Image (cartoon, coloured by chain):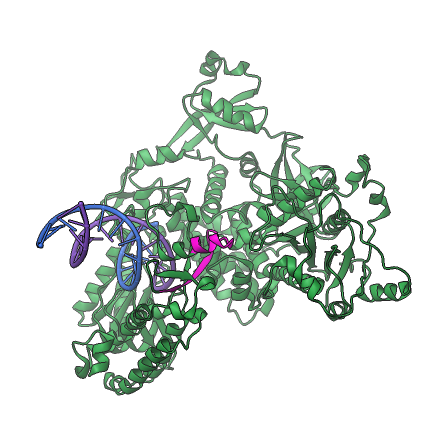
Chain colours: A green, B purple, C blue
Amino acid sequence: MKKPRRGPTLLDFLKQKQANDGSKALKAPKPVEEKAPKRPLEGAEKIENKIVNLIVSKKVDPQFQKFVNSGDRRYAALAQPRREAGDGEYYLLQVVYDGKRNKAVLLLYDEERHEVVEWVDAFGHKPYFLTNLTPEEIRKLGLHKHQNFAGMEVVYRYDLLHFENRKLTKIYTTDPLAVRELREKVPKAWEAKIKYHDNYTYDIGLVPTLKYKIKNNKLFPVPYKVSEGEVEKVLKAFEEESDEFKRLAISWIPIFEAPPPTVKAIAIDIEVFTPAIGRIPDPETAQYPVISVALSSNDGLKKVLVLIRENLKLTEDQLKELAEEDYEVEFYDSEKSMLIEVMRIIRDYPVLLTYNGDNFDLAYLYNRALKLGIPKEMIIFKKGSDKFEIKHGIHIDLYRFYDIAAIKTYAFGNKYKEVNLDAVAGALLGEHKVQLTKSISELNYYELAHYNFRDANLTLKLFTFNDYLPWKLMVLIARISKLGIEDLTRKQVSAWIKNLFFWEHRRRKYLIPNKEDIISMKGTVKSSAIIKGKSYQGAFVFEPSAGIFFNVVVLDFASLYPTIIKQYNISYETVNAPKCKNYYEVPEVGHRICKDVEGITSQIVGLLRDYRVKIYKKKAKDKSLDDKMKMWYDTVQSAMKVYINASYGVLGAESFELYCPPAAESITAYGRFAIKSTMDYAKKNKIAVLYGDTDSMFLWDPPQNLLDDIIEWVKNNFGLEIEIDKTYRFVAFTGLKKNYIGVYPGGEIDVKGLLGKKRNTPQFVKEAFIKMIEMIRNSQSPEEVVKTREEVKNLVKELYMNLKRQYYDLDELAFHMQLTKPIESYTKNMPQHVKAAKMLAKFGIHVNQGDVVSFVKVKGAEGVKPVQLAKLPEVDVEKYYEAIESTLGQILKAFSLDAASLSGTTKLMAFLNK
DNA sequence: ACATAGAAGCTCCTCC
DNA sequence: GGAGGAGCTTCTATGT
């Protein structure tokens, strides 16, 4: 990649300044159209340093300059459309539908030139849907006379819901929108709600991020050469499977083995002036100027473009500070010129990265550019239905990617909770945003550029860290799901899974079922959930007794639900299927799972699971491979994990296109059956079962031979795998479910579910909790724990004293709770954090859905105040005593039962009074 | 009519 | 996805 053109640096500015010495400083013209902030900002006036009045006017390229005030068409040179793909090899990034050309278009990545080119469908593919009317009946209805009717054809599709081949009529339409209209005119329609570009992907059998070749405007897949050894390895791993399974397995090898495309990408972040503190500028109206734009690319461009503002002086000190940074800064006296330059830079990058660009940065730039009189055709951004696109490439909004629940939980193990840039970067990169003590509009030029650049740079890193782990994850998910990069990064896991299954249906010429048909055919659930409001019964949780137990072995079913899906052939079509001869009867709920055919979802989930367990988890640790390859395979196995783990969940999610509650219910029923039976077996063998949740069993000091026996028994009886997950020196159970402290032989600790671990617990209580755990972690027997009583007593006393003395600051006292929905939708109740959020709103600080509110408990009617508005003396100390008691009390509970001297005491105070 | 204790409901966070 | 715990709010039965 060539180094980007260097713009004028700060040194250039300083030189220019020296050259201008003695002469009058340049005068900033008024910002285009928009008024400058009405009153001078306080921060600027306070600067006592020598004011240099250095203002630099950056001219836009001459070729654009002439268009600034004209409607000349050549203005569009800035927003170049994608070139058409010439002969060559490319990576498919995304399939789109182009309304103007009324055709599907492939967005292809040219890895040599680093640009996105396009290939317009040359197959003559047309939109269509299916109906069970015969062509004659269609004619009778007069449908063929409709202006958007484009022909029909009789086709056969295998109907998985009825286990029969069906004769259907395929009705072609002139454009995708017409499908919506015509499908209403027939009594029954299939495959009529699939987006056209997805439908196209299925029909052509496209796999995004794999290589394709264009020759004479014809499209060919570029076969990835799989080594013989690899094929053998796969066949060996799956030797017990059906031929169809093996064929599928082999056809999937390239998905996991072909290298990912190397893309040239740039991250952008903007800052906007706002007169009111805490108000986020509205991108729709875009009424305030963009004051700074930061760019950071993976080929070394690091730049901040800053708007010179009236009333805000640039000092020499600021320039010196800026000169020491590793990014360039360019100053503009015209916002319009600045935005044009921004677009000119981005145009050289085929992949644009933003953090919330769909809803803010790009939306703002787009509307602001329009407002400043830049013609739409020239603007490189394009408004989509739920996203912003760039005309020359693709736009990845990383906020939307990291916001995907499956990415959050399965790929990154819930390391971040809030999905703002600071939280995600903090958790994944260990880096944070620049902390601000004043509002954006009050920052000086240095502070602004510095703050802005950090954001853009963090955005880039969230794409590139760990040798491009996030990008590779996207690539792999694109290949498995068959969704384009722009689509998959904006859709939840249920859409990924749906797309893969639909693609496979089409490949096998299966009819894609309608959601309502699945529900009406398969019946409803037969169990009822333990928790009110949930639709069916879930996992079994063992009721533990409080106390300490030494030498605890934890057995764990290896990916229980996916294994059940495979082992018992669970799929929407195999559950309660008609015309079925052989079936499994599901315990407790009584559904019948057909054994006659291999269920499609069972097969695919099973394949991914087996691939992960038998091949890629091993490859990720294979010492004969270099680090780079191992990392790639680790990403492969973690992409599979995301898919596998989500596959059960979506079956029970109403929003899923193949929603099938009896299937979901059968999976959990088998799970309960397996774990309960195994626990019974252990008990029969005189092993004490202490606890278990969903797929785990805590056994008290079991002999090794009996463990081996259990593992064997589970394999033989259920075809499931159970293994030793971990061994604890001791486990302290509090007597509550999902709530224990496990101590490993080496002294490391697992704390599960205890209050001290929860995010909402105040910092000072958390710290005391950790101290207390430290005190007991080295205990070798329950009696030793009792010996720590004096220490614990002092710790608690100290806490009480400190509270009284107002030793802790408000931040340490704060409870933190997330607003899980928009503030106005708390209609049934008014929880404390919502109360606090409303108080903040009165002060102009708006808290949105997903934000965490920090509040303290205070005396008085309201009982609560946001940290920002509270004062130490009003804190309700009693409430904090309660918090200490419940948090630390949980630990004591575990120890109080086994230690005779503590028996009967559950309350902290009782414990201390002894 | 009103106070109040306990039950029921809501919300959040965590576990698997 | 459901299960489970905590702490709060709101509803309701009961007593005065």
- Provide residue A77's location: percent of width, then percent of height: 79, 41
- Provide residue A95's location: percent of width, then percent of height: 60, 41
In the image: residue A528, left or right of residue A291: left
Task: Assess whether residue A908 is covered by the magenta stretch.
Answer: no
Q: How many numbered circles are shown?
A: 0
In the image: residue A138, left or right of residue A661: right
Q: Residue at x 68, y 44 (%)?
A: A368
**Residue A912, quarter of picture:** bottom left
Quadrant holding the C terminus of chain A = bottom left
Q: Residue at x 26, y 51 (%)?
A: A531
- Provide residue A513's location: percent of width, then percent of height: 41, 34
Task: Assess whether residue A841 is covered by the magenta stretch.
Answer: yes
Q: Could you tell me if residue A702 is visible in this image?
A: no
Instruction: Return the residue nearer the eye: A230 or A525.
Output: A525
Q: Residue at x 17, y 72 (%)?
A: A686
Instruction: Give the answer, above or below, for where A665 lies relative to A155.
Output: below
Q: Could you tell me if residue A271 is visible in this image?
A: yes
Quadrant holding the N terminus of chain A = bottom right
Instruction: Return the residue nearer the eye: A530 or A596.
Output: A530
**Residue A863, quarter of picture:** bottom left
Question: Which stretch is magenta?
Answer: A837-858
Instruction: Give the answer, above or below, for where A449 lies relative to A284.
Output: below
Instruction: Return the residue nearer the eye: B15 or B12.
Output: B12
Instruction: Give the answer, above or below, for where A392 lies relative to A4.
Output: above
- Provide residue A702's location: percent of width, then percent of height: 24, 75
Instruction: Give the answer, above or below, for where A207 lies relative to A322.
Output: above
